[in-house]
Image (cartoon, rainbow, N blue to C red):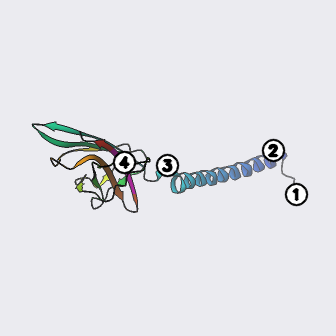
Amino acid sequence: MFAEPPTHALISSWVETVKNVCEILAILVGAAWTYLNYFRGRTYKPRLECSIDASVEKHSGHSFLQVAVKVRNIGLSRVPVDPRGTALLVYSLAAQDHTPSFPSQIRWDNPVAAFGLFSGKKWVESSETIAEALMVALPRAGAVTYKVTLKVVSGEIWWTAESILAHT
C-alpha cells in the first residue's frame, strides 16, 4: 500500500514552484526594463549641448571677431564628431541705406567664412566638454552686424548654436 506524502513535503514543493516562477518573472521584468531603458530610451541617444560666446574686439585700429565655442555631452553614450561638417560659420550684414517701414526679419543668406573645429577630436565622451577659441580678422569696411553659427555634425544628427553681434 501506498503511503500518502506528508503535507509538509507537499507545501514545501508548492513553495519551491512559486519561488521559481517569481524568479523567472523577475528576470523577465529586468530584461524588459533594460530593453526599454537602453535600446529605446532617450538616455543613451546622442545628446550634445552647444554654446557660443562671440564678441568684436578692437586692437590697434583693427577689428577682430573673438569666438569661444563649447560642446558638452549631456547624454550617457559617446558621441562621434564628424570633422567634415563640424564648423564655425560667419554671416555678415551690411548697413542698410534705408530704414524699413515695418519690422522685418533679417535673412542671413550665405556664410562669408567657415572655419573647421575640433579637428583632433573623433568623439565626445559622456559628461565631457570640449572647447575651442578662434580669433578672426574682420575687414575694415562693410559689414556692421555678424551672425556666428556653431554647427556640430555626428552622422545623421547635427546640433547648432548661434550668436548675433553688432560691429560698431
Q: CB under 8 Å between callouts 4 and 2? A: no
Q: CA distance from mark 3 to mark 4?
A: 22 Å
**Of pointers 3 and 1, the one earlier in the residue sequence:** 1
Q: SS class of the residue under badge 4?
A: strand
Compared with 51, 112 (above or below) is below
Which amino acid type is shown beneath numbered disc 3?
Thr
Foreground tag (4 vs 2):
4
Name which of mark 2 and mark 1 comes first in the sequence. 1
Residue 86 among magenta residues: no
- What residue does disc 2 label? 8
Is residue 77 or residue 89 the one in the foreground?
89
Could you tell me the amino acid type at mark 4? Ala
**Residue located beneath label 3 in the image:** 43
Q: Residues within 10 Å of mark 1 (few under 14, many from 20)?
A: few
Which amino acid type corresponds to the residue marked 1 in the rendered image? Answer: Phe
Pointers 3 and 1 in contact (C-beta within 8 Å): no
Q: At x 16% / y 49%, what residue is drawn?
A: 139
Magenta: main secondary structure: strand
Front label number (1 vs 4): 4
Region of the chain picked out in magenta, as a range: 158-163
